[in-house]
Amino acid sequence: MNPIDLRSDTVTLPSPEMRQAIANAELGDDVFGGDPTVNRLQEMAAEMLGKEAALLVSSGTQGNLIAQLSHCARGAEVIIGEGSHIIEHEGGGAWLVGGLGLHTVRVDAKGRLDLAEVRATIRPDNEHYPRTGLICIENTHNRAGGTVQNEEDLAAVRELANKHGLPVHMDGARIFNASVKLGVPASALTVYADSVTFCLSKGLGCPIGSVLCGSKEFIHEARRMRKVLGGGMRQAGIIAAAGIYALQNMIDRLVDDHDNAEHAADGLANMPGVTLSPPPETNLLYFTVEGWKAHKLEARLNAAGVLCFDEGGRIRWVTHYGIERVDIDEALARTRQVLAAGA
Ligand SMILES: Cc1ncc(COP(=O)(O)O)c(C=O)c1O
């Protein structure tokens, strides 16, 4: 039985055309600033996100950590939504490496920060308190269900940050999913943040890499922090070539992933006991089934060749390049059988 891999959009494999672009990449030593393909990717990314400069990094986790280290001095406090990827899935790097405090605030069902709580969390300038150094947001929001924050949502965060002279970092691992969903350029969303990390290695189908974007001054500091973290890569044009291909060819097709997630949601919603939690906005789909513990359902689905995870008591399916409509139909048919067999 062929497995249908809905665990994550990180399982995507490079297309033949992307592999060709990798094979043909012009290379140099990027730690010396001499890899023309990396430089080209960085210029493209900065332009697309409306920033002065960009930096290729090894992963979204590294990009987010570099951003926090570059914005904040040791001992500063980062204000961040509870359940955000930086808090839950990045190994506590900000604490461990940066000596930063992460102060969580409530988020709503879409992953938007509770701005009243943010306001109350920003520290006055007083020697008794840590300094507030940064506000982090996540768009699309993974745990909330691939939910999208629009320009109005982001402008409200920006306005508050401006009032207090604070920078904003956006974990935009899936920012192009948000831009495609809203039908606006990514720069229309990233304009509200000082820095943004986006991932090449998720829905854009690259094997490795993320890009951190911001002002020239910020990226100068970020480059130093990347080096400190061991992230200075040499002939990294091998990675960047895939990124350039992705920025040129893989963004528009994200709409197919969103359509497939919606199709999957429609099919699941028709099965007895299934609750979408919530219905998908982009390519992430979470659900529960009455009478089933998520870890047990995960095991049964995996045994039936529908690869997915129990994410904190909900089953998560992720649609991505390489998953077609027929795969979703097959995943739905297998799921129906698993549920019919009973818990
Ligand atoms: C919202 C979000 N941010 C950051 C990351 C981290 O990316 P990476 O796995 O490249 O470190 C992920 C990975 O899934 C993510 O979903």
Image (cartoon, rainbow, N blue to C red):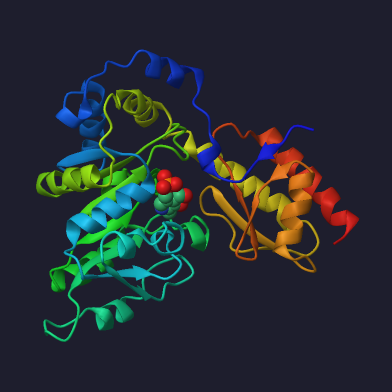
Q: Residue at x 28, y 40 (%)?
A: 231
Q: Nearer the viewer, residue 64 or 266?
A: 64
Could you tell me which quadrant the C terminus lies in? bottom right
- 30 relative position to 175: left or right: left
In which quarter of the view is residue 3 placed? top right
Could you tell me which quadrant the N terminus lies in? top right
Where residue 263 appears, as percent x and y from the top left, is 65, 46
Q: Nearer the viewer, residue 56 or 325?
A: 56
Where residue 193 appears, as percent x and y from the top left, is 23, 56
Rendered position, 251 above or below 164: above
Q: Nearer the viewer, residue 338 or 253?
A: 338
Q: Is residue 181 visible?
A: no
In which quarter of the view is residue 150 placed? bottom left
Q: Residue at x 27, y 15 (%)?
A: 26
Where residue 289 appears, as percent x and y from the top left, is 74, 64
Where residue 88 appears, as percent x and y from the top left, is 46, 63
Q: Residue at x 69, y 38 (%)?
A: 4
Q: Residue furthest top?
A: 24
Q: Residue at x 15, y 83 (%)?
A: 124
Rendered position, 123 above or below 194: below
